[in-house]
Image (cartoon, rainbow, N blue to C red):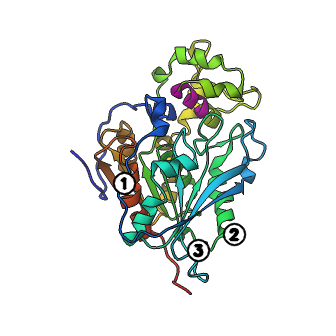
Amino acid sequence: MLQAEKRSAGSRKAWLRSLGAMALMLCAEPSWSQANTGSPPAQPGAPTLTVERIKVHGRSLEGNLEGESADRTVLVILPPNYARQPGRRFPVLYALHGYSIGAEQWTQEIHAPATIANAYAKGLPDMIIVMPDAKTVHNGSMYSSSVTTGDFENFIARDLVAYVDSHYRTIPDRLSRGLAGHSMGGYGTSRIGMKHPETFGALYMMSPCCLSARPAEQFNPAMGADLEKVKALSDSASLPFMLRAQLASAAAWSPNPKKPPLYIDLPVQDGKVRAEVIAKWAANAPLAFVDQYIGNLKQYRAIAIDVGDQDSLKVDAQKLHEVLDQYGIANNFTIYPGTHVSNVAFRFQDEVLPFFGRELKAGKAGR
């Protein structure tokens, strides 16, 4: 049975063991990054939007051991009235892409700017939409704080927001900033959102991955042996999807500045599962640390979570929803017909954007 937009505090239920919703469990096929998500039809009166491709320097990313560029590509999609009303300021939505894709592929996956233009044709209030690129040598930063990849958490919450506020006509108020993301981006939204209520006022997690800690038995010694053979960062590009994602997770959650050239600790070494590394990964699971940030979450004007009914990530997404209910934190939770990626463009157009259109504090219209 589908469940739609539950707000009431629900009782806790007995759940299945974690399905291992880490980045490496997102999909069994490496072609996921080229997913055909379906394109919503053009709406009459949809405006032509301006898309700016800029570089934003992240102080939080400087000196990372992986050699990731501190100058990140960012797509900024300006609202229809941005040029026509030079005295007006606008709310901002920051939208985070998933694992194995960057900002450009994220726009293809959600068919932007067409879906954004469609939303305006349907009455979406003007807002600036910002899409940063967090793709790394191993295909994803996990939007985490690591000496190996760089501090992408604070790049989003501090560096990027500061840049956008200083270079665009924004409303520099947390209640006028939203944070959303799909899959790894949904994980980033949960992680950053819990820790930075001073920056954002509304959150929308689309099919968030990586919410639960993985038990030791889910780590495959054979995969560990393959990863131990990787001797250079460049070797990552030839790895299968699962193995590459495990490197990305290690770079984000178990960095080791004393272990060049990858600067990571793997969860399996010499055929044995390393409990101390698994513990570090578990410490980065939002369902493990959410109880520490309840006061922060209560500061949000609105929180939403959605997931497809054919997506294994729905188990953990519902767990997060129930934790919020348990603490009396209002949240919209929706299980909709679809897979991990099948309806993401439609959801972005018809659910995510209108959500922020309702919840973000807008400025006064000006000339």
Kind of element beneath mark 3: loop
Q: Amino acid at mark 3?
A: Ile
Q: Quadrant of residue 233?
A: top right
* Tag shown at residue 81: none
Crowd rating for badge 2 (residues with CA inside 10 Å; few <14, some 14–19, many 20+): few
In the image: residue 291, left or right of residue 76: left
- Tell me where the magenta segment starts and ends, as one range: 241-249
Crowd rating for badge 1 (residues with CA inside 10 Å; few <14, some 14–19, many 20+): some
Across and down, in percent, residue 265 comes to 66, 26
Most foreground residue, 3 or 235: 235
In the image: residue 320, left or right of residue 173: left
Kind of element beneath mark 2: helix
Q: Amino acid at mark 1?
A: Phe
* Tag shown at residue 166: 2
Crowd rating for badge 3 (residues with CA inside 10 Å; few <14, some 14–19, many 20+): some
Kind of element beneath mark 1: helix
Q: Amino acid at mark 2?
A: Ser
Q: CA distance from mark 3 to mark 1?
A: 28 Å
The residue under label 3 is: 171
Q: Earlier in the sequence, mark 3 or mark 1?
A: 3
Q: Earlier in the sequence, mark 1 or mark 2?
A: 2
Q: CA distance from mark 2 to mark 3?
A: 11 Å
The residue under label 1 is: 346
* Image quarter of the C terminus: bottom right
Across and down, in percent, residue 127 comes to 51, 70
Vertically, is 301 above or below 56? below
In the image: residue 65, left or right of residue 360: right
